[in-house]
């Protein structure tokens, strides 16, 4: 029965329309992107026993915050350790495993919520769901790159845009389901988890069923690979095991780590930050609108910047992210002093578009540097930078802010320092990007003699 | 080669259906977010 999932069963026949593949990838990324909306469950899960209020025996928000952190940590680890399996198994089997784990994570977490056992929730959504996130994130990358050798940035940008869009679906869906299942004796969380597990499984099955890999040697009609060597675009292939022996891998790791750290720390603070910087002018509801606007730019930037990188080149695109990002971060305190909400919002919108763009352009950058052969596995290993940034970003921002406020700095001023720090991180990212060169031929995989 | 052509017929209809499958939820999510973001400009 499971032979259907084998790689050889997914090889497309002649005339297959490659535009059927992006929806397959999107069905996975739109589903797993729900993880970014997990925080909507935190407050309801903090009153599972008290229902209308948080009882003494209810879970604390700090306890609940670990579910998301754990899931993101496991995402990075499973992508890193499961990447080579994804290469061997092919996209359909990997997407199916992702769907089983991600949906199964919801069902196990539902059991944990119903039994009020946090360990089962960590194990379900954090561990099992996290494995689903990691496998699902890297599974369609190589497939898209091989179908779109002419526009790899656009193709992977489309899928990774889905990850950004997933939260926009997951958040209102969760709120609507919890409102539906809410009663005098239940906040409706476990029932919502069960429904979401089943719905997401069905939704992800479209990707499993429709994904195809091109036949060996296939190229799009009218496509001719560049005959002249292109700067920083290799014609060779580097294995995942060899990639981690190159300095280019670690510069790329720093590029992703610094770009994500600079974005993620501030993203989590966006709502209180705009309220404190424009005290009396921005209400909590308007601040919620600001967060929504940033999500839109984060998602849109993933597709637009990544597509633009096909024309600009990957290294210049990252140079723009870092240089423009640093300049905008350095300017935002001034917009606060000027009292210009419009300029402040505009600056952050552009910053967030480049934060998203940084995520989406990295697979194509890896393809350029290491070749297509094991790009999913290499991407998986590079995603540990995301897990590290997920921990470092918020800790850095929160710690520095608390330290400053503890030393008598006004809250609005404390944000200014944070922004200068973020600008500094992006300058480091700029330097790391500038140090990326072509991989030496000794790391390339030797082609078997014909 | 492709052993299950019935599942994904390579037709414009299949293409439309696949894009609607992902496009409709995404459009709903985006519209919900746009409504939320509009509050900022009131």
Image: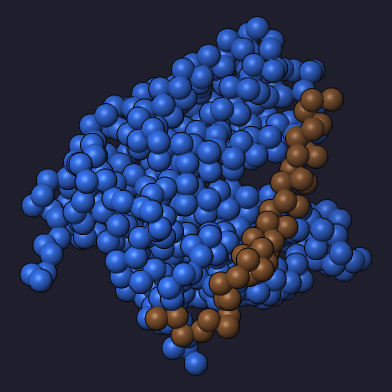
Chain colours: A blue, B brown
Above or below residue A310? Residue A428 is above
Relative to A20, A144 lies left or right: left
Q: Specify the quadrant that holds the C terminus of chain A.
A: bottom left
At x 77% / y 71%, what residue is drawn? A191
> Relative to the observer, which residue lies in front, A387 or B22?
B22
At x 61% / y 36%, what residue is drawn? A297
> Relative to the observer, which residue lies in front, A325 or A64?
A325
**Farthest residue in the top direction?**
A338
At x 39% / y 68%, what residue is drawn? A214
> Relative to the observer, which residue lies in front, A258 or A450?
A450
- Where does residue B33 sit, x and y in percent of width and height? 74, 43
- Where does residue B27 sit, x and y in percent of width and height? 72, 51
Where is residue A289, by image quadrant?
top right
Relative to A40, A84 lies left or right: left
Where is residue A3, by image quadrant?
bottom left
- Where does residue A66 sit, x and y in percent of width and height? 56, 54
| Count of labels in the image | 0
Above or below residue A40? Residue A265 is above
Above or below residue A430? Residue A268 is below
At x 55% / y 64%, what residue is drawn? A20
Relative to A332, B37 lies left or right: right
């Amino acid at each position: 029965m499971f032979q259907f999932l084998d790689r050889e069963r997914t090889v497309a026949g002649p005339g297959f329309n490659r535009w059927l593949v992006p929806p397959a990838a999107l069905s996975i990324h739109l589903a797993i992107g729900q993880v970014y909306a997990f925080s909507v469950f935190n407050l309801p899960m903090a009153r599972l026993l008290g229902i209308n209020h948080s009882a003494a025996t209810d879970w604390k928000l700090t306890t609940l915050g670990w579910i998301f952190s754990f899931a993101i940590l496991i995402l990075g680890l499973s992508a890193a350790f499961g990447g080579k399996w994804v290469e061997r198994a092919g996209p359909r089997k990997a997407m199916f495993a992702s769907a089983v784990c991600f949906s199964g994570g919801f069902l196990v977490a539902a059991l944990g919520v119903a039994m009020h056992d946090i360990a089962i929730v960590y194990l379900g959504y954090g561990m099992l769901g996290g494995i689903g996130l990691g496998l699902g994130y890297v599974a369609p990358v190589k497939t898209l790159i091989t179908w779109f050798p002419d526009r790899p940035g656009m193709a992977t940008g489309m899928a990774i845009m889905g990850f950004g869009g997933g939260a926009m679906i997951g958040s209102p869906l969760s709120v609507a389901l919890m409102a539906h299942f809410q009663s005098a004796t239940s906040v409706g969380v476990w029932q919502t988890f069960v429904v979401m597990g089943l719905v997401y499984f069905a939704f992800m099955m479209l990707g499993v069923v429709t994904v195809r890999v091109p036949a060996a040697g296939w190229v799009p009609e009218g496509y001719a690979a560049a005959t002249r060597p292109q700067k920083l675009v290799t014609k060779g292939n580097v294995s995942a095991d060899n990639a981690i022996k190159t300095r280019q891998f670690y510069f790329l790791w720093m590029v992703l780590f610094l770009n994500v750290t600079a974005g993620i720390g501030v993203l989590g603070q966006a709502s209180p930050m705009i309220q404190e910087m424009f005290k009396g002018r921005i209400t909590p509801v308007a601040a919620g609108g600001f967060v929504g606007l940033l999500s839109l730019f984060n998602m849109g930037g993933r597709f637009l910047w990544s597509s633009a990188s096909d024309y600009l080149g990957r290294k210049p695109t990252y140079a723009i992210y870092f240089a423009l990002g640093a300049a905008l971060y350095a300017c935002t305190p001034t917009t606060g002093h000027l009292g210009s909400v419009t300029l402040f919002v505009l600056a952050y919108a552009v910053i967030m578009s480049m934060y998203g763009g940084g995520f989406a352009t990295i697979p194509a950058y890896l393809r350029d540097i290491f070749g297509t052969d094991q790009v999913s596995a290499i991407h998986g290993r590079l995603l540990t930078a995301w897990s590290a940034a997920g921990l470092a970003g918020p800790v850095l921002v929160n710690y520095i802010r608390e330290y400053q406020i503890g030393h008598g700095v006004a809250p609005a001023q404390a944000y200014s320092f944070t922004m200068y720090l973020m600008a500094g991180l992006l300058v480091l990212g700029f330097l790391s990007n500038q140090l990326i060169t072509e991989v030496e031929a000794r790391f390339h995989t030797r082609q078997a003699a014909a | 080669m492709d052993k299950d052509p019935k599942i994904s017929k390579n037709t414009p209809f299949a293409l439309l259906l696949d894009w609607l499958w992902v496009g409709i939820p995404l459009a709903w999510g985006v519209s919900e977010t746009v409504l939320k973001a509009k509050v900022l400009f009131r």
